[in-house]
Image: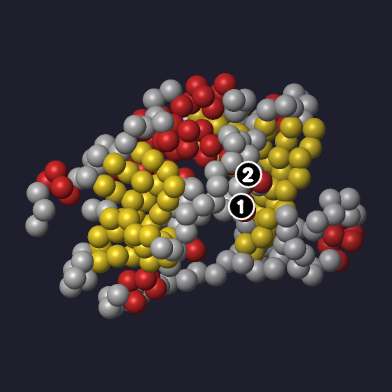
Amino acid sequence: MPDHQTRRQHAIVIGGSMAGLLAARILADHYQKVTLMERDTFPALAQNRRGVPQGRHAHGLLASGSHALERLFPGISNEFAEAGALTGDIAGDVRWFFEGGCLRQFNNGLTGFLMSRRPLLEGTVRRRVLALPSVSVRESCQVEGLVANGDAGAITGVRMRGDTVAADLVVDTTGRGSQATEWLEAMGYRRSLEERIEIALGYTTRHFRRRPWHMNSDVAGVIGPTPQGKRGGAILAQEGDQWIVTLYGHFGNYALMDWRVSSSSRAACQHPLSTK
């Protein structure tokens, strides 16, 4: 078995979204070198990228997530605020609707951030991670498999087209597009059990002008789906005097694309539509 220093030399993280960025941040405390491998090319701060198709829809950063990021990246909350993110009390400034009723509002001291885009959150975190001296990134990099030692007793790196990179630890954060199970099975490992829960979720989003008196100055409203309706939505305040409204549905019960449809037509129209 390699000694402690050898085991702590190099870690590879596959996937550069939020999970990969935060994994790289944690590993940077324990490994001399961390390589982040991402199939996309990272865009400029606060721009969407292909690998995050839901990035154009409503996003918020709840209190526990904000606290966790602040511990990992001291001062990042100030960066969000300077970039225009709004804040509000999670219980006092937000209207939560469940089973058709609005929950009682009260200030609980838990502050969340409202951001115009998921890329603002991800881009700010990415900038902080890539500024760490032990972290490097390989963009437009497609990992095609894993590398193991002679008896396949340990994973020793990753394989790309025409190249292999050795590592003491490989972390896969590519989410539902992960091929780790197939890679391991091809190397002789037993296929891991998989449990799937289908929800067939679809989103539709639009921006509207916001006025200070809207919703009695509350900054957000969240309506959860019910077993009968299978539809929900969120309205979030944003910088630039805007609301972002995202409606979502399950199993084909999606929101209509044309927001100008009358209520009578809306009630009669049940066919599924593609979403933005």
Residues under numbered marks 2 and 1 in contact, where contact means CB atoms less than 8 Å apart: no
* Residue under numbered circle 1: 50
Q: Is residue 58 left or right of residue 138?
A: right
Residue 137 in the figure: left or right of residue 59: left
| Pointer 2 residue | 48
Q: Is residue 248 left or right of residue 38?
A: right
Q: As displayed, is residue 233 above or below residue 76?
A: below
Q: Residue at x 67, y 31 (%)?
A: 238
Q: Which mark is residue 160?
A: none
Q: Picture coordinates of residue 36 (x, y %)?
A: 40, 47
Residue lying at 80% horizontally and 56% vertically, measured from the top left: 257
Q: Which class describes the residues within 10 Å of circle 2: few (<14), some (14-19), or many (20+)?
A: many
Identify which residue, 222 or 173, lies in the foreground: 173
| Structural crowding at the residue carrying mark 1, measured as other residues with C-alpha within 10 Å and reported as few (<14), some (14–19) or many (≥20) | few
Quarter location, residue 30: top left
Q: Report, in whole angstroms, how far the alpha carbon at label 2 lies from the one at label 1.
A: 7 Å
Relative horizontal placement of residue 205, taking residue 83 as reference (left or right): right
Q: Position of residue 45 (x, y in %)?
A: 58, 34
Q: Position of residue 23 (x, y in %)?
A: 36, 45
Q: Which corner quadrant holds the C terminus?
A: bottom right
Residue 56 in the image, given as x and y percentages of width and height: 66, 46
Q: Is 232 located above or below residue 125 in the figure? A: below
Q: Quadrant of residue 117?
A: top right
Identity of the amino acid at label 1?
Answer: Arg
Q: Work out whether residue 19 can be spotted.
A: no
